[in-house]
Image (tube, rainbow, N blue to C red):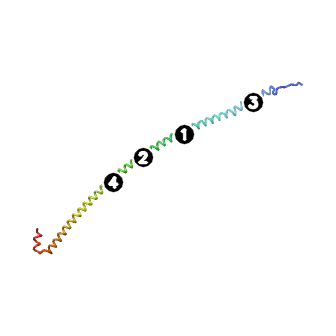
């Protein structure tokens, strides 16, 4: 028997080469089966996340545009409402002025009608009083004066 002396801890022989080849085969298969699909999934996920980020940025921009348009429309609506309010207020004031003028005209007309009616009634009352005064005067004359004196006075 032969005594082999080994000083080194690892001896290089066929077993090491076979183990090295087995490890390389394992690493190749592991890379093919596990690492590539996993890396593909990770890349797909990164693409998906970037697309979601882009969608979020686009949605934020769209939100800002919609918000800006809504603020502009609100400002325009407020301006239109204030304008309409001012127009209605002006129209109301003009209508009120017209009503006041019409009312004053009607009041003046009613005052004139009442004055005319009062004057007419006053004239009628004066005429009535004059006629009654004449009748009273005639009666008084007939009672107080002799009959012959009445004829000469009445005819005049």
Count neighbours of disc 4 (C-alpha within 10 A) and say few if under 14, some if 14 to 19, many if 20 or more.
few
The residue singled out by tag 1 in the image is 60
Q: Residue at x 14, y 74 (%)?
A: 144
Q: Residue at x 65, y 35 (%)?
A: 42
Q: How many marks?
A: 4
Q: Quadrant of the N terminus?
A: top right
Q: Nearer the viewer, residue 46 or 99?
A: 99
Looking at marks 2 and 1 on the same chain, the residue that comes earlier in the sequence is marked by 1
On the image, the x and y values in percent for residue 137 come to: 16, 71
**SS at badge 4:** helix
Disc 4 + disc 1, Cβ < 8 Å: no
Which is more foreground, mark 4 or mark 3?
4
Q: Nearer the viewer, residue 94 or 29?
A: 94
Rounded to the nearest whole Å, what is the CA distance between mark 2 and mark 3? 84 Å
The residue singled out by tag 3 in the image is 23
Rounded to the nearest whole Å, what is the CA distance between mark 1 and mark 3? 52 Å
Res 48 quadrant in image:
top right
Count neighbours of disc 3 (C-alpha within 10 A) and say few if under 14, some if 14 to 19, many if 20 or more.
few
Q: Quadrant of the C terminus?
A: bottom left
The residue singled out by tag 4 in the image is 100
The residue singled out by tag 2 in the image is 82
Above or below, 7 against 56 in this view is: above
Disc 2 + disc 3, Cβ < 8 Å: no
Which is more foreground, mark 4 or mark 1?
4
Rounded to the nearest whole Å, what is the CA distance between mark 4 and mark 3? 110 Å
């Amino acid at each position: 028997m032969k005594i082999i002396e080994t000083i080194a801890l690892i001896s290089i022989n066929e077993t090491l080469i076979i183990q090295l080849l087995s490890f390389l085969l394992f690493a190749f298969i592991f890379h093919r089966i596990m690492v590539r699909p996993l890396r593909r999934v990770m890349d797909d996920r990164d693409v998906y996340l970037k697309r979601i980020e882009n969608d979020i940025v686009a949605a934020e921009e769209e939100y800002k545009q919609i918000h800006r348009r809504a603020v502009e429309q609100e400002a325009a609506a407020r301006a239109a409402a204030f304008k309409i309010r001012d127009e209605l207020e002006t129209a109301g004031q003009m209508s009120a002025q017209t009503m006041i003028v019409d009312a004053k005209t009607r009041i003046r007309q009613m005052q004139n009608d009442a004055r005319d009616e009062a004057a007419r009634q006053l004239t009628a009352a004066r005429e009535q009083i004059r006629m009654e005064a004449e009748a009273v005067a005639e009666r008084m004359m007939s009672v107080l004066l002799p009959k012959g004196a009445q004829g000469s006075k009445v005819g005049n």
